[in-house]
């Protein structure tokens, strides 16, 4: 019995370009073996309990050899019988991704596998630069070629055969030429193509870090290719595209440079509160790494469920409370019928909506959506001895209990500071430009979970803070601080944009 291996294409960078099938498998994976080019946002979609294995460390670090990766996949399939091993690769696994080699090894070892194609950078990166790889009247074919060192050296030495580029044929090919890898060899490739007769004026574009917030397009021609790479410092990962279609990029470049393009920001709010600010920063062009500093854990209260009969009103003050209560109720073998005849109260609209997901309509929601409002509303009810059960988290304050002295409280979940970040997350955070803090505790916990860099300070060094207390905490911890004028997310987002447009 062995697990199943999925060779999954992660797409070119933009997390929105991962396939639905790929996401579904990552959410269930037991092990994720991933490459260097896979974005942190996609790693963040993986099952939080999965073992995360980085086999594509940065160039200066040790990189796991292909033969070792092949062996690892077989090994993990053995270690997780009936489990899911996700092999996550940039772009498409079978387009210069060595997915075929991995699949052959799995076949040889008798391990079951499935291929989940990805969107290859060869086509999508030009698309994000406004360059269609084929176009009526301009290019009737396109060719995806490796510019990798080994192949080029082979052809430089005059070798022929599968591994060398056939410059003669390429030079006379009327279609669009797309080179993956090999920016370092592009000067040589361009010269050879011209020697073999390709027009030196052929338009050409280098597209660097395509589909990511750092995307950059540099235009040149075949004869200026080498010089342009040096002058503009074009760096990997980048693709080179040659042919008439490149000209279309001048009118079709649709991806706007936004105020926060190219910035990587860490948002430390709890996952549920983070989505609003994440969406706003992303819309402004930033790459956001959500790194909540607290996590919630459902608490055991199933032994109490038989006592539900003793209550007339159930009051919820958070969506966490709703989710924790029902997950335990169901796990204990009950269903919503135990709530028949009871009145349900919610502190506000969001909790009310959450209850509706469980098929429950609220009887009481205060106008002002506060605990105080809810307490007053329940206290004013015309039922003298209504027995109220409060379903809350461990950090809920005593407002409700004070207003409803005879109510009972069950603590259904607790909120804890995050004690550790997975390695991939620490690396992504350390490479960020800045971190966003909305509370003192978030600052203090962040410094605990992020190890100090060699200079003795936590990376990143810049912090955007809401509120003066948060700012003081960040200052104490050695951050450069920028504080919002008002204590709202809107005001903070405005400040972040101002800071980067200085
Ligand atoms: N399987 C991948 C290609 C792997 S080879 C795919 O289908 O896309 C790695 C090369 O792909 C890089 O050297 C670069 O040329 C190209 N590449 C991958 N992602 C890229 C990106 N976001 N922007 C530009 N080029 C990219």
Image (cartoon, grey):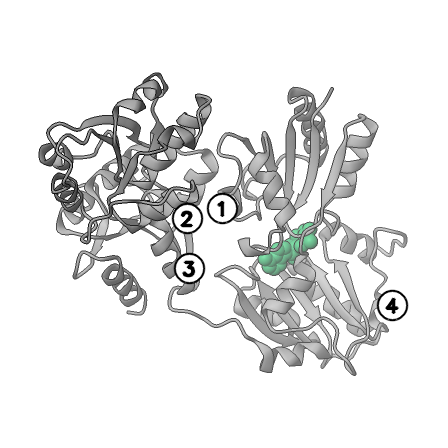
Q: Earlier in the sequence, mark 4 or mark 2?
A: 4
**Badge 4, how many Cα within 10 Å: few under 14, some, many 20+?**
some
The residue identified by callout 3 is 282
- Asked if residue 502 is positioned above or below residue 29 in the image, the reply reads below
> What label sits on residue 487 in the rendered view?
none
Residue 290 relative to residue 80: left or right = left
Q: Which of marks 3 and 4 is nearer the N terminus?
A: 4
Q: Distance between the residues labelled 2 and 1?
A: 7 Å
The residue identified by callout 4 is 168
The residue sitting at 90% across, 52% down in the picture is 161
The residue sitting at 43% across, 44% down in the picture is 357
The residue identified by callout 2 is 289
Q: Please, what secondary structure does the residue beneath circle 3 have? A: helix
Q: Earlier in the sequence, mark 2 or mark 1?
A: 1
Given residues 38 and 380, the one toward you in this image is 380
Q: Earlier in the sequence, mark 3 or mark 2?
A: 3
Ligand 1 position by quadrant: bottom right
Quadrant of image for the N terminus: top right
Residue 155 relative to residue 277: left or right = right
């Amino acid at each position: 019995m062995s697990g199943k291996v999925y060779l999954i294409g992660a797409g070119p960078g933009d997390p929105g370009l991962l396939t639905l099938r790929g996401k579904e498998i990552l959410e269930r994976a037991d092990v994720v073996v991933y490459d260097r080019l896979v974005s942190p946002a996609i790693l963040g979609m993986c099952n939080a309990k999965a073992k995360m294995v980085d086999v594509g460390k940065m160039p200066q670090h040790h990189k796991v050899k292909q033969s070792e990766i092949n062996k690892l996949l077989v090994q993990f399939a053995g270690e997780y019988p009936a489990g899911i091993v996700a092999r996550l690769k940039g772009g498409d696994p079978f387009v210069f991704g060595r997915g075929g080699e991995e699949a052959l090894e799995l076949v040889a070892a008798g391990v079951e596998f499935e291929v989940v194609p990805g969107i290859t950078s060869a086509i999508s990166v030009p698309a994000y630069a406004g360059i269609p790889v084929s176009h009526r009247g301009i290019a009737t074919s396109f060719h995806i070629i490796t510019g990798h060192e080994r192949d080029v050296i082979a052809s430089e030495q005059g070798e022929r055969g599968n591994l060398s580029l056939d410059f003669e044929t390429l030079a006379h090919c009327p279609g669009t030429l797309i080179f993956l890898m090999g920016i370092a060899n592009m000067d040589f490739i361009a010269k050879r193509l011209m020697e073999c007769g390709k027009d030196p004026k052929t338009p050409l574009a280098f597209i660097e870090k395509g589909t990511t917030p750092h995307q950059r397009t540099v235009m040149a021609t075949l004869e200026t290719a080498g010089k342009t790479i040096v002058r503009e410092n074009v760096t990997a990962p980048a693709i080179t595209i040659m042919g008439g279609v490149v000209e279309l990029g001048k009118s079709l470049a649709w991806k706007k440079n936004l105020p926060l393009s190219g910035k990587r920001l860490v948002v430390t709010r709890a996952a549920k509160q983070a989505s609003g600010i994440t969406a706003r920063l992303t819309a402004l062009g930033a790459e956001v790494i959500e790194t909540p500093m607290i996590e919630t854990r459902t608490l055991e209260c199933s032994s109490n469920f038989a006592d539900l009969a003793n209550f007339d009103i159930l009051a919820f003050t958070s969506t966490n409370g709703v989710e924790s209560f029902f997950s335990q109720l169901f796990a204990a073998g009950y269903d919503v019928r135990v709530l028949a005849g009871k009145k349900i109260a919610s502190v506000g609209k969001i909790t009310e909506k959450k209850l509706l997901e469980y098929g429950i309509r609220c009887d009481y929601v205060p106008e002002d959506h506060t605990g105080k409002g809810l307490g007053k509303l329940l206290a004013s009810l015309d039922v003298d001895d209504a027995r109220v059960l409060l379903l809350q988290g461990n950090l809920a304050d005593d407002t409700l209990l004070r207003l409803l002295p005879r109510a009972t409280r069950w603590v259904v979940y607790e909120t804890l500071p995050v004690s550790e970040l997975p390695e991939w997350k620490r690396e992504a955070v350390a490479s960020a430009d800045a971190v966003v803090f909305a509370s003192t505790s978030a600052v203090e916990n962040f410094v605990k979970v992020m190890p100090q860099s060699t200079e003795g300070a936590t990376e990143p060094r810049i912090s955007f803070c809401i509120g003066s207390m948060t700012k003081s905490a960040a200052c104490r911890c050695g951050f450069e601080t920028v504080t919002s004028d008002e204590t709202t997310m809107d005001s903070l987002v405005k400040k972040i944009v101002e800071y980067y447009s200085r």
